[in-house]
Image (cartoon, grey):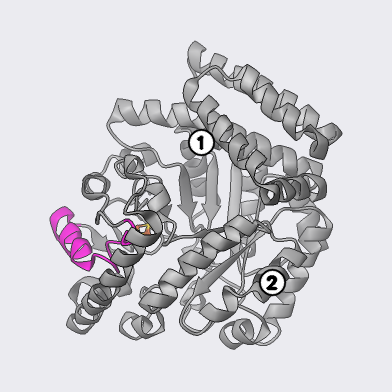
């Protein structure tokens, strides 16, 4: 780290430490003081503008104020401080200039977050999931995960999402969370392995915010994942809530559960349980039988209703929802290979968790070198795939794109379903039809609800 970099990190750490002291004393009543301190201390215009924007949103919305105060009051102090230090201080502030500098020097884009699947093993055997086919020897070895996380941090990545398989089924990840205590980790979990010792451990670590997967209520969850699973997830949420460990929920939406998971009843249930965030994903045709998977995907109106409902829930702000697809206009469309990427359990570097194609494998290869690949360059060159940012995806909205990109860059399928996506005539006909059907609905919604505008500045990274 050079002198300037070190100085910048130290200055930012000093400001964050003062904020943390305020959070330690009486967080709820110190919110105004924290904003005023940030305003006085921050020198660069870009960060100052972000603070001002957040302040305007905060002061104009009693619901946001309630949400923030609730978090400050009910979150364990250590977890709160780690969130502030790692996520806000490192990932969203100190890390920005670091990522930008390394990105500019190397003519690449360093992602804001790295997704990693260290192991595909799982304690459950859900319908349609292929995790049961994996054993321990298929895991990425500890030393390799350690190297990749360290390299990510050296590049300025301080926010890491852990997938799988079941992240808490893999014993060594707790050691990784402990070792990299300046990074914020977000494991997406089936939510069934939380017991007192594990939750105590997470409380003392402070830098891990689990996202617990639910498909709806008991009926929807147990039908897909087995009897008793819903109750087990609820028990996990209760334990986390009691200890003040922040957590969220993650929901895969298909035409079987959409009405349930956007209902007031479902949101209230998660709020009562203490969830702070909610991720909505759309069921994607990337499982063992992609041709059949298409039948379970959301219809055009269901997909757009999900987006509308997400924006409503965000206004009510009992918890903070993100809709991975319908929020695309806010981030310039597709973010794959630019703001995020995924290392699978074979160490292939994929641009997106749903896009199982790669040209690089990071075994014996520095992450920085892999990020320089022509494949990711080509993706960024083509972003956004559609001027209508409600049609962000190269696989389901603009499916000719994925076929062209793979041909052009020589990217190889990393999962058998990906091969089907680009070669199987029945699948191609079905997905092209699905995209064509959705387009007029999306065009109308983009014009009506977004005034045909989105964050095009973010499109190119
Ligand atoms: S490839 Fe599709 S699913 Fe992945 S980030 Fe882009 S738009 Fe989203």
Q: Residue furthest top?
A: 3
Residue designated by label 1: 153
Please provide the residue range marked out in magenta. 389-410
**Cα gap from disc 1 to disc 2, whole angstroms:** 30 Å
- Disc 1 residue crowd, few under 14, some 14–19, many 20+, Cα 10 Å: many
Q: Which residue is mark 2?
A: 192
Return the x and y of residue 385 as percentages of the image width and height.
24, 55
The disc placed on residue 291 is none
Magenta stretch encompasses residue 400: yes
Would residue 30 be counted in the magenta stretch?
no
* Residue 31 pos. (x, y %): 74, 34
Residue 406: percent from left, percent from top: 19, 60
Please state the horizontal and vertical placement of residue 171, each as a whole percent of the image.
Answer: 65, 58
- Is residue 400 visible to us here? yes
Nearer-the-camera pick, 113 or 122 = 113
Picture quarter containing residue 225?
bottom right
Nearer the observer, 388 or 163: 388
| Count of numbered labels shown in the rendering | 2
- Which residue shows up at 71% across the image and 53% down it? 246
**Residue at the spot 58% in from the left edge and 20% down from the top edge:** 42
């Amino acid at each position: 780290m050079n002198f300037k970099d070190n100085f910048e990190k130290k200055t930012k750490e000093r400001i964050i430490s003062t904020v943390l002291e305020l959070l330690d004393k009486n967080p709820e009543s110190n919110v105004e003081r924290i904003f005023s301190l940030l305003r006085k201390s921050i020198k660069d215009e870009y960060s100052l503008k972000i603070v001002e924007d957040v302040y305007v949103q905060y002061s104009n919305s009693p619901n946001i104020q309630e949400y923030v105060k609730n978090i400050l009051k009910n979150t364990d102090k250590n977890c709160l401080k780690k969130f502030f230090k790692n996520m806000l201080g490192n990932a969203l502030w100190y890390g920005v200039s670091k990522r930008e500098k390394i990105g500019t020097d190397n003519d690449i884009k360093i992602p804001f977050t790295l997704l990693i699947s260290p192991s595909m093993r799982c304690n459950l055997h859900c319908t349609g999931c292929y995790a049961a086919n994996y054993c321990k020897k298929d895991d990425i070895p500890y030393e390799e995960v350690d190297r990749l996380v360290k390299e990510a941090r050296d590049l300025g990545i301080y926010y890491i999402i852990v997938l799988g398989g079941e992240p808490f089924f893999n014993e060594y990840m707790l050691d990784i969370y402990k070792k990299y205590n300046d990074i914020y980790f977000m494991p997406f979990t089936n939510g069934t392995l939380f017991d007192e010792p594990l939750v105590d451990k997470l409380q003392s670590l402070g830098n891990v915010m689990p996202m617990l997967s639910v498909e709806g209520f008991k009926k929807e969850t147990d039908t897909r994942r087995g009897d008793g699973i819903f109750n087990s997830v609820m028990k996990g949420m209760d334990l986390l809530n009691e200890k003040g460990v922040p957590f969220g929920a993650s929901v895969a939406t298909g035409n079987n559960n959409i009405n349930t998971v956007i209902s007031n009843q479902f949101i209230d249930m998660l709020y009562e349980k203490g969830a702070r965030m909610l991720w909505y994903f759309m069921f994607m045709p990337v499982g063992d039988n992609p041709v059949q998977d298409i039948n379970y995907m959301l219809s055009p109106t269901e997909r757009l209703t999900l987006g509308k409902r997400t924006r409503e829930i965000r206004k009510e702000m009992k918890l903070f929802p993100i809709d991975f697809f319908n929020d695309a206009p806010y981030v310039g469309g597709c973010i794959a290979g630019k703001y995020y990427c995924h290392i699978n359990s074979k160490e292939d570097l994929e641009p997106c968790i749903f896009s199982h194609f790669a040209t690089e494998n990071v075994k014996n290869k520095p992450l920085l070198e892999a990020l320089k690949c022509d494949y990711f360059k080509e993706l960024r060159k083509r972003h956004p795939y559609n001027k209508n940012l409600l049609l962000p995806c190269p696989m389901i909205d603009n499916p000719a794109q994925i076929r062209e990109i793979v041909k052009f860059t020589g990217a190889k399928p990393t999962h058998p379903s990906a091969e089907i996506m680009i070669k199987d005539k029945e699948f191609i006909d079905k997905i092209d039809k699905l995209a064509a059907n959705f387009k007029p609905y999306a065009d109308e919604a983009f014009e009506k609800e977004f005034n045909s505008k989105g964050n095009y500045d973010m499109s190119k990274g």
